[in-house]
Image: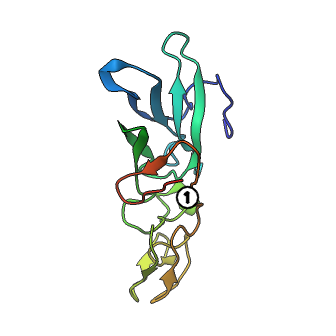
């Protein structure tokens, strides 16, 4: 399900990680996070999302979509003062895309500020050398990786922020 529509339910390749009411024990809308995690679904990048779940019917309505996906998708939810926070996991375990990441097709990790790489290259499998924070088999020793490379900057109404590493506000 590449572009789930309202009511389609949670994504089939999972996982669904967290579920929380926006006002805690006082209720309100019920939110959940899910993805077609790239390690389970053959490299489906940007499939993580935050959804609203109807607790009576089970219907799911996408709220925030196209979030980075990889080894660690969108996960924990928290709410405070009308803001929604969620943890956004890294797309790799090591900062380097390897054959274990959708056979090299998964997106690279995404820095939230410009970073300068070391001169190191890493064996990503089968002798393919890759720099950190770079697409598979891309060498960029000592190069600069721009913030949000290979992603998008999220700006949406409703005062949404990502936590803990990158925060976005309207």
**Is residue 147 or residue 135 the one in the foreground?**
147
The image shows residue 101, relative to residue 76, as above or below, that is: below
Give x and y (percent) for residue 17. Answer: 40, 35
* Callout count: 1
Secondary structure of the residue carrying tag 1 is loop
Residue sitting at x 55%, y 75%: 137
Residue sitting at x 40%, y 44%: 85
Give x and y (percent) for residue 43. Answer: 58, 51
**Is residue 11 or residue 27 the one in the foreground?**
27
Q: Residue furthest front?
A: 81
Q: Which residue has dot 1 on it?
A: 106
The image shows residue 74, relative to residue 101, as above or below, that is: above
| Residue 51 placement, left or right of 118 | right
**Crowding at label 1, few (<14), some or many (≥20) Cα neighbours within 10 Å?**
many
| Residue 12 placement, left or right of 32 | right
Q: Residue furthest top?
A: 56
The image shows residue 14, relative to residue 138, as above or below, that is: above
**Is residue 121 or residue 52 the one in the foreground?**
52
Give x and y (percent) for residue 89. Answer: 40, 52
Residue sitting at x 49%, y 36%: 34
| Residue 118 placement, left or right of 68 | left
Give x and y (percent) for residue 13. Answer: 54, 35
């Amino acid at each position: 399900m590449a572009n789930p529509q309202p009511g389609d339910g949670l994504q089939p390749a999972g996982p669904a990680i967290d579920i929380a009411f926006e006002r805690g024990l006082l209720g309100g809308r019920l939110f959940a996070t899910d993805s077609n995690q790239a390690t389970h679904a053959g490299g489906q990048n940007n499939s993580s999302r935050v959804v609203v779940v109807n607790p009576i019917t089970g219907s799911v309505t996408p709220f925030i979509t196209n979030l980075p996906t990889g080894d660690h998708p969108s996960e924990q939810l928290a709410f405070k003062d009308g803001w929604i926070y969620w943890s956004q996991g890294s797309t790799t375990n090591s900062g380097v895309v390897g054959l274990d990441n959708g056979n090299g097709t998964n997106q690279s990790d995404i820095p939230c500020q410009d970073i300068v790489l070391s001169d190191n290259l890493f064996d990503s499998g089968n002798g393919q050398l890759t720099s950190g924070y770079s697409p598979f088999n891309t060498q960029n020793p000592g190069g600069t990786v721009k913030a949000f490379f290979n992603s998008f900057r999220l700006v949406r109404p409703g005062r949404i922020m990502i936590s803990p590493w990158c925060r976005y506000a309207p």
